[in-house]
Image (cartoon, rainbow, N blue to C red):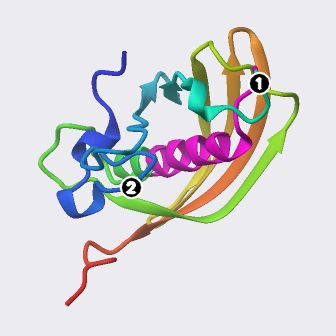
Amino acid sequence: MISKAVQDYYPDHFAHCFGCGRLNAHGHHFRTQWDGAETLTEFTPLPEHTAIPGFVYGGLIASLIDCHSTGSAALALYRHAGHELGDSEPVPRCVTAALTVNYLRPTPLGPTLRVRGRIESVSARKAVITSQLWVLDTITVESRVVAVAVPDTFGQLS
């Protein structure tokens, strides 16, 4: 169980994402945290997340990777600026600039999915995240995401 996830610190106007938004009653509520030098998101798919019986739908996997990576980028940018979760400074919100998902083998439905991410590079506004999706002791997916921070006013209607 993840106790201190970056998504818990997003401002309310950034907390509606279908994948990771804590304020989206119908969303997946993906949650990302530091796990040593890596980042971690865990999710247990439901039967309705089926592609072919017994296997997880690839679109759900791409969504999981996407939210894990933007959350990882937010963590990396926040740490790069000298902060840790719980500081008084607002946590940055990132969006995906590029997403590459390589499906290595079918992902079985049932066990908890664990996405482990590594920060490949980080600057003031951009982070590159590489990740692997693990099912038990097998890697089924690898990914690379470029994520960028958006201004606090991003997406607000005037």
Name the spot of residue 32 as percent of width and height, x first.
43, 34
Foreground: disc 1 or disc 2: 1
Three-letter code for the amino acid on which mark 2 is drawn: Cys
The residue located at (40%, 45%) in the rendering is: 20
Quadrant for residue 12, please give it.
bottom left
Point out the tag, 1 or 2, that comes first from the N-terminus.
Answer: 2
Residue position for label 2: 17
* Position of residue 133 in the picture relative to residue 147 (left or right): right
Name the spot of residue 78 as percent of width and height, x first.
35, 50
Name the spot of residue 6 as percent of width and height, x first.
33, 40
Q: Secondary structure at mark 1?
A: loop
Q: How many circles with numbers are drawn on the protein?
A: 2
Give 87 or 106, whichever is nearer the viewer: 106
Quadrant for residue 134, please give it.
top right
Figure quadrant of the N terminus: top left
Residue 52 lies, with reference to residue 7, above or below; the image says above
The residue located at (29%, 60%) in the rendering is: 14
Q: What's the distance in space between the residues labelled 1 and 2, CA to CA?
A: 27 Å
Q: Main secondary structure of the magenta part?
A: helix
Three-letter code for the amino acid on which mark 1 is drawn: Pro
What residue range appears in magenta? 54-73
Residue position for label 1: 53
Q: Secondary structure at mark 2?
A: loop
Residue 37 lies, with reference to residue 87, above or below; the image says above
**Neighbourhood count class around disc 2 (C-alpha, 10 Å): few under 14, some 14–19, many 20 upward:** some
* Position of residue 16 in the picture relative to residue 135 (left or right): left
Give 104 or 40, whichever is nearer the viewer: 104
* Position of residue 116 in the picture relative to residue 151 (left or right): right
Figure quadrant of the C terminus: bottom left
